[in-house]
Image (tube, grey):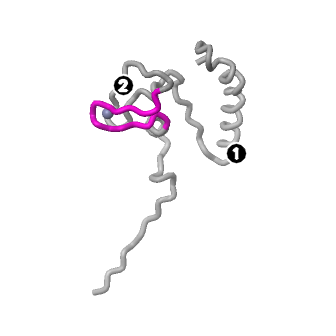
Amino acid sequence: MLKNHCLAKSIADAGWHCLITKLDYKAKQAGKHLVNIDQWFASSKTCSCCGRKQESMLLNIRSWTCECGYVADRDINAALNIKHQGILKLKAEGLSVSANGGKRKSSTLLVAA
Ligand SMILES: [Zn+2]
């Protein structure tokens, strides 16, 4: 990303290593596991519905329609792809993934007879 002259200064200022170090520290403190996604994973260009990858995409394109008909907001699509990759990595490491972030409650329906 630093090769892009329009974004290089902002990206260099962001301090990604410091952010990841703090996230890892906080995750361990909370008993959580931080999953690193490959920096070259095409999260914005890959359809989160069918998995088809676009050849190229300019930064100013904020939404696009996949050949499967899915209309993808660039950021939401990327977030969904990153979530899927994280779940795959957790499963590959043998760590369980709870449904809905562990917030899902089982319920029992009472039926009068
Ligand atoms: Zn698609």
Depth check: 83 or 56 in front?
Answer: 56
Q: Badge 2: few (under 14), some or many (20 or more) residues near its Cα, within 10 Å?
A: some
- Which of discs 1 and 2 lies nearer the camera? The answer is 2
Report crowding for label 1: few under 14, some 14 to 19, many 20 or more residues within 10 A (C-alpha).
few
Would residue 62 be found to the left or right of residue 30 on screen?
left
Q: Residue 103: x and y, percent?
A: 51, 58
Locate residue 92, reporting x and y percent. Answer: 45, 35
**Which residue is nearer to you in this view: 72 or 112?**
72
Residue 74 drawn in magenta:
yes
Q: Which mark is residue 53?
A: 2
Measured along the vertical axis of the image, is residue 46 above or below residue 27?
above
Quarter holding ligand 1: top left
Location of mark 1 (residue): 29
Q: Which amino acid does label 2 sit on?
A: Lys
Q: Write down the region rendered in magenta.
A: 61-75
Q: In which quarter of the image is residue 20?
A: top right
Q: What residue type is labelled 1?
A: Gln
- The residue shown at (40%, 37%) is 72
Instruction: Give the secondary structure at mark 1.
Output: helix
Mark 1, ligand 1, within 8 Å: the answer is: no
Query: Who is closer to the viewer here, 12 or 111?
Result: 12
Q: Residue at (51%, 55%) from the top-left corner?
A: 102
- Report if the CB atoms under discs 1 and 2 are less than 8 Å apart: no
Is label 2 in a helix, a strand or a loop?
Answer: loop
